[in-house]
């Protein structure tokens, strides 16, 4: 019973930190209050996010909560990103953040956000992810691929172990929402 209480208190503290970070993001953007978000999104975001005490992960959860505060409280579009983030490890989040920040972004001829190819060698990938085990790195990249965030990873035929960590369009959309922005990713990255 004592362990349950400690875990509950730890989760409550994490949820409170996420909520405060979300409110800061909302105020910084002149947005509306968290109470305007779809109740389902608020509940699920805080429920999943409360399992994380790392600041860099809490910032992403707070961003998703902040970007859920639309004027139309029936909009539950962030559910896609909430479910995806809840499946990611801290190391995958580091790769995700690095790829979305570093890759050159552009608008496709049809007006959609895309990223140019982003490759990195093993030492850089180890530094970014904080993983020194090549097999675990391969698994993490495979998992990012299965989530639709990084479509490539290591080539099984490449002896140099260069990883293609180009973020997918879905990854770029998710990254923007995780920053607390509900608008166009093209506008966020200054491409319009």
Image: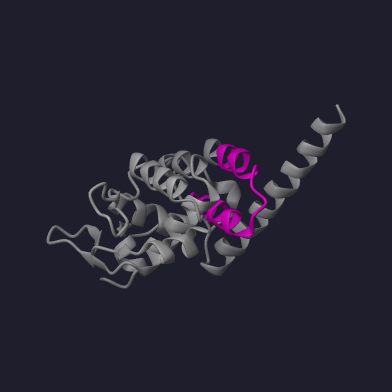
Is 16 placed left or right of 164 in the picture? right
Q: Residue furthest left?
A: 109
| Magenta segment main secondary structure | helix
Q: Residue furthest front?
A: 159
Q: Nearer the viewer, residue 98 or 42?
A: 98
How far across and how far down the image is residue 173, in percent?
A: 35, 54
- Image height check: is 118 above or below 35? below
Is 121 placed left or right of 180 in the picture? left
- The residue drawn where x is 43% and y is 65% is 123
How far across and how far down the image is residue 191, in percent?
A: 27, 71
- The residue drawn where x is 44% and y is 40% is 76
How far across and how far down the image is residue 167, in percent?
A: 32, 56
Number of numbered discs overlaid on the protein picture: 0
How far across and how far down the image is residue 101, in percent?
A: 40, 67
Q: Is residue 21 magenta?
A: no
Quarter location, residue 99? bottom left
Render colour scheme: one colour
Quarter location, residue 164? bottom left
Position of the N terminus, as image quadrant, is top right
Position of the C terminus, as image quadrant, is bottom left
Res. 67 visible in picture:
no
Q: Is residue 53 magenta?
A: yes
**Which residues lie in the magenta part?**
42-69
Quarter location, residue 77? top left
Q: Residue furthest top?
A: 1
- The residue drawn where x is 40% and y is 41% is 143
Is 134 placed left or right of 106 in the picture? right
Q: Nearer the viewer, residue 80 or 133?
A: 133
Res. 21 visible in picture:
yes
């Amino acid at each position: 019973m004592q362990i349950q209480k400690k875990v509950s208190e730890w989760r409550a503290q994490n949820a409170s930190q996420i909520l405060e970070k979300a409110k800061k993001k909302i105020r910084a953007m002149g947005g509306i209050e968290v109470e305007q978000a779809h109740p389902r999104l608020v509940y699920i975001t805080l429920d999943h996010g409360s399992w994380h005490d790392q600041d860099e992960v809490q910032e992403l959860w707070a961003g998703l909560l902040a970007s859920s505060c639309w004027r139309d409280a029936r909009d539950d579009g962030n559910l896609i990103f909430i479910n995806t983030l809840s499946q990611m490890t801290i190391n995958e989040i580091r790769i995700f953040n690095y790829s979305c920040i570093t890759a050159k972004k552009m608008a496709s001829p049809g007006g959609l956000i895309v990223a140019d190819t982003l490759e990195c060698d093993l030492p850089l990938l180890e530094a970014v992810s904080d993983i020194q085990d090549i097999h675990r790195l391969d698994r993490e990249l495979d998992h990012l691929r299965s989530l639709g965030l990084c479509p490539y990873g290591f080539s099984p035929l490449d002896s140099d172990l260069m990883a293609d960590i180009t973020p997918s369009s879905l990854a770029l959309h998710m990254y923007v929402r995780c920053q607390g922005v509900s608008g166009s990713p093209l506008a966020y990255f200054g491409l319009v």
